[in-house]
Image (spheres, grey):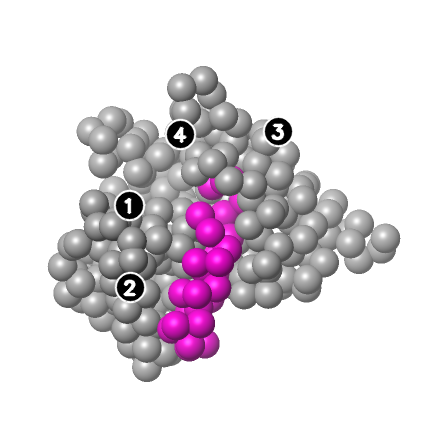
């Protein structure tokens, strides 16, 4: 079990405290003090890396900005390549190989050009990641391949690299309008990282995020599918109860996280995941 630290709090100290309160020793890093990992000044990053190491906590993955909701396929590709270069050095310092990416919103570009451009950019990123010893994990979220198993498979095939695998978020289907277990089935063998999230749809197309197993995302079915296929990676919680980073794109307040809610969510997620794993191991 792991957790995206800034879902608990902006500061590293509180993030570490929340993970340790759960009895866990794995942290997924996205931002510290509201600043993405790759954008941290070098002295700040070095101090953070040292503090994480002293705490005896491992970093399971870094959630990058590459290809996410803030970077459409029309944006300058040099920005993503530069971020990957920084993360190659910083992930080595943190002791992790996994970097979360997405596959570029259209930015108004129509198919098929959107698809061609997104695939080409991810292919180049994957080849650079392979040279750097990293593994990019593409999330089923914003971007060309985020909501379609067929597109995700096409993305993997075109990159043709062991440095591109998938991150499956159990809760994104509610917000993006697809059935998560149905999306997962043809992709499960390529999943290298998991985000545990649950949600319910609201009138008007809005989404409310709830505790794991309490929503309509099919979290338990997703966990069962992954367990049955022998998934052995981390189960990293992303509650979205008090922090939704994508809201900043609309000018709305994304929130600051909440340590107590994070810990409560983590306990519920651990109970659900461990129960399903036990049932799958002893049917």
Q: Position of residue 34 (x, y in %)?
A: 25, 42
At label 2, counting other C-alpha atoms closer than 10 Å, the crowd grade (few under 14, some 14-19, many 20 or more) is few
Q: CA distance from mark 3 to mark 2?
A: 38 Å
* Residue at x-position 63% and y-position 62%: 231
Q: Does 171 lie within the magenta span?
A: yes
Let me know if residue 127 is in the magenta part: no
User: If you read the primary sequence from the N terminus, does the residue marked by circle 3 or circle 2 appear first?
Assistant: 2
Q: Which residue is mark 4?
A: 242
The residue mark sitting in front, 4 or 1, is 1
**Label at residue 69:** 1
> Which residue in the protein does label 3 denote?
214
> Residue 245: where, in percent of width, then height?
31, 38
Q: Nearer the viewer, residue 51 or 238?
A: 238
What secondary structure is marked by label 1? loop
When the figure is inspected, residue 82 is found, relative to residue 65, above or below; the finding is below
Q: Are marks 2 and 4 in contact (CB under 8 Å)?
A: no
Query: Which of label 3 and label 2 is nearer to you?
Result: 2
**Residue at coordinates 21% horizontally, 47% vertically from top-left?**
107
Counting residues from the start of the chain, the first of labels 2 and 1 encountered is: 1
Q: Measure how far apart labels 4 and 1 are at the Cα level.
A: 19 Å
In terms of secondary structure, where does tag 4 sit? loop
Cα–Cα span, label 3 and label 4: 17 Å
Q: Do the residues under discs 1 and 3 have CB atoms within 8 angstroms?
A: no
Disc number lying in front (1 or 3): 1
Dot 1 surroundings within 10 Å: few (below 14), some, or many (20 or more)? many
Q: How many marks?
A: 4
- Real-space CA distance between mark 2 and mark 4, rounded to the nearest whole angstrom: 36 Å
Q: Which residue is mark 2?
A: 116
Q: CA distance from mark 1 to mark 3?
A: 27 Å
- Earlier in the chain: of badge 2 and badge 4, it is 2
In this view, the mark in front (2 or 4): 2
């Amino acid at each position: 079990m792991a957790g995206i630290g800034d879902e608990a709090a902006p500061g590293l100290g509180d993030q570490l405290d929340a993970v340790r309160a759960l009895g866990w020793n794995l942290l997924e890093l996205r931002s510290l003090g509201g600043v993405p990992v790759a954008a941290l000044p070098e002295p700040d990053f070095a101090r953070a890396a040292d503090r994480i190491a002293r705490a005896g906590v491992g970093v399971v993955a870094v959630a990058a900005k590459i290809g996410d909701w803030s970077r459409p396929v029309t944006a300058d590709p040099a920005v993503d390549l530069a971020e990957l270069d920084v993360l190659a050095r910083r992930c080595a310092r943190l002791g992790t190989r996994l970097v979360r990416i997405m596959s570029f919103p259209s930015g108004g570009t129509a198919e098929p050009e959107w698809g061609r451009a997104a695939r080409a950019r991810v292919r180049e990123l994957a080849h650079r990641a392979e040279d750097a010893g990293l593994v990019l994990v593409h999330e089923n979220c914003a971007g060309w391949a985020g909501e379609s198993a067929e597109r995700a498979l096409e993305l993997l095939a075109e990159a043709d690299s062991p440095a591109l695998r998938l991150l499956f978020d159990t809760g994104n289907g509610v917000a993006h309008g697809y059935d998560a277990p149905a999306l997962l089935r043809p992709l499960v063998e390529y999943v290298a990282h998991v985000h545990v999230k649950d949600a319910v749809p609201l009138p008007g197309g809005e989404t409310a995020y709830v505790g794991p197993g309490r929503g309509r995302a099919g979290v338990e079915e997703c966990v069962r599918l992954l367990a049955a296929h022998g998934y052995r990676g981390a189960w990293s919680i992303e509650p979205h109860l008090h922090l939704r980073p994508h809201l900043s794109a609309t000018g709305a307040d994304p929130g600051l996280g909440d340590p107590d809610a994070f810990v409560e969510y983590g306990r519920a997620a651990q109970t659900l995941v461990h129960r399903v794993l036990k049932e799958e191991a002893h049917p």
